Amino acid sequence: MTESQPLSEHTADVIVVGAGPAGSTTAYYLAKAGLDVLLLEKTAFPREKVCGDGLTPRATKQLVSMGIDISEEAGWLRNKGLRIIGGGVRLQLDWPDLAAYPDYGLVRKRDDFDEQLARQAQKAGARLHERCNVGAPIIDDRTGRITGVHAKLGDADSKEKREVTFHAPLVVAADGNSTRLSLAMGLHRREDRPMGVAVRTYFTSPRHDDDYLESWLELWDKRGPGEDRLLPGYGWIFGMGDGTSNVGLGVLNTTSSFKELDWREVLKAWCASMPEDWGYTPENMTIPIRGAALPMAFNRQPHYTKGLLLVGDAGGMVNPFNGEGIAYAMESGQIAADVIVQAHARATPAQRELALQRYPKVLKDTYGGYYTLGRAFVKLIGNPKVMKIATQRGLTHPILMKFTLKMLANLTDPTGGDAMDRIINGLSKVAPKA
């Protein structure tokens, strides 16, 4: 394919809205294949994003594929696995040895992480516009297809905002959970899919260089009066390697207490119950507690319609088993780019459309069955009693927990794996791909 020249400053082969992990990965692979890509980001880098900052081997693989330098010299902290705490048990599990994925994860703050991906997309040839706030889609009256976007360029604070329009035959919505672009195209959230919320903060702490990501499976509301209450969710402690720990909670909406509780207060109380020498006290907090939604299990569909493709959080790609979003954001970006490149090379609009219709099918083949299992899991653990029994019984069986880790982190070899891999892959294959 000959490399596309920019048709004009505001016209491209593809517009990608949002330069988070999903958008930057999409733009990187499109630009690398020779397409002219506009990558539009509403803020300026570096920018904060609410996240646990912990990356599993699945996300690590994506970074390697994009040619990112993930050495410790480049500021990445490696982790060996997951430490699980619950039911009075503490179990340390190494990431599995697999042919398909590395045996280590990484930790990196999101402001810096996201910028690295965006700059990598730029290096590949994507045209990045920061402080570019995308508004309404431009829709062709005859066909109902999206043909571009209206946007405002300029600082959030500045009065001088320039209104511009960008045009392209294809637009990728990588604008996160709120995805105004998808809503403007009539794609609404599916209420039958689970939703999570994450709240987190950072503390200066001696535990900052932990080799393991730490997950607490029992989340107690200790704010009284009366007995402590077991809540449906999990806590995490991830050492950042820079003198701080990322401490947060992930909570599911499959529970009656989801809306009634102030999760920031729950996080404060949870931190207050930690050993004093860990330093998770208000005076050691480096930034205020912030929260974000975790859209799970394909909670917005269809993933392709009328020239618009959804990637990452915009398409509800977060893994319902563990709340991980970055790996799936990047993987969906790579899948979308691959489909777009193939469609772009076709001769007629009908052939291009046929190629683009593959995108939701590939996503369903890749994740549909696994996410269906995840939705069933989420319903189960929405009941704190089930979670308590599972924690008390399961954590005392290391082999069962090794299986659970592979299942929760979606880490199996697709072919030629061990018996555990074959069981998990088999379950994912037979589950409905909804």
Image (tube, rainbow, N blue to C red):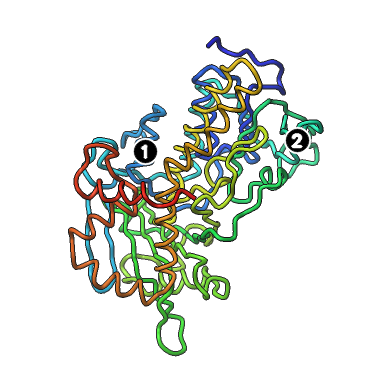
Q: Nearer the viewer, residue 127 or 353?
A: 353
> How many numbered discs?
2
Where 425 falls versus 88 (above or below)? Answer: above
Q: Which residue is mark 2?
A: 144
Q: Amino acid at mark 1?
A: Gly
Which of discs 2 and 1 lies nearer the camera? The answer is 2
Q: Residue at x 64, y 32 (%)?
A: 171
Q: Secondary structure at mark 1?
A: loop
Category of crowding for the residue at label 1, using alpha-carbon neighbours closer than 10 angstroms: few (below 14), some (14–19), many (at least 20)? some
Q: Secondary structure at mark 2?
A: loop
Q: Where is residue 143 drawn, in percent x and y?
A: 76, 31
- The label on residue 75 is 1
Distance between mark 2 and mark 1 Cα atoms = 46 Å
The reply, left or right, for residue 284 in relation to residue 291 is: left
Residue 334 locus on image (x, y percent): 47, 32
Q: Is residue 131 left or right of residue 258?
A: right
**Pointer 2 or 1: first along the chain:** 1
Using residue 407 as the reference point, say whether residue 266 is left or right of it: right
Direction top: furthest residue: 2
Above or below 296: residue 20: above
Q: Amino acid at mark 2?
A: Gly
Q: Which mark is residue 209?
A: none
Q: Are marks 2 and 1 in contact (CB under 8 Å)?
A: no
Q: In this image, 49 relative to 423: left or right?
A: right
**Label 2: how many Cα within 10 Å (few below 14, some 14–19, many 20+):** few
Residue at 53 percent of width and 49 percent of height: 316
The quarter holding residue 221 reads bottom left
Query: In x, y percent, where is residue 165?
Result: 76, 30
In the image, is residue 299 above or below residue 343? Answer: below
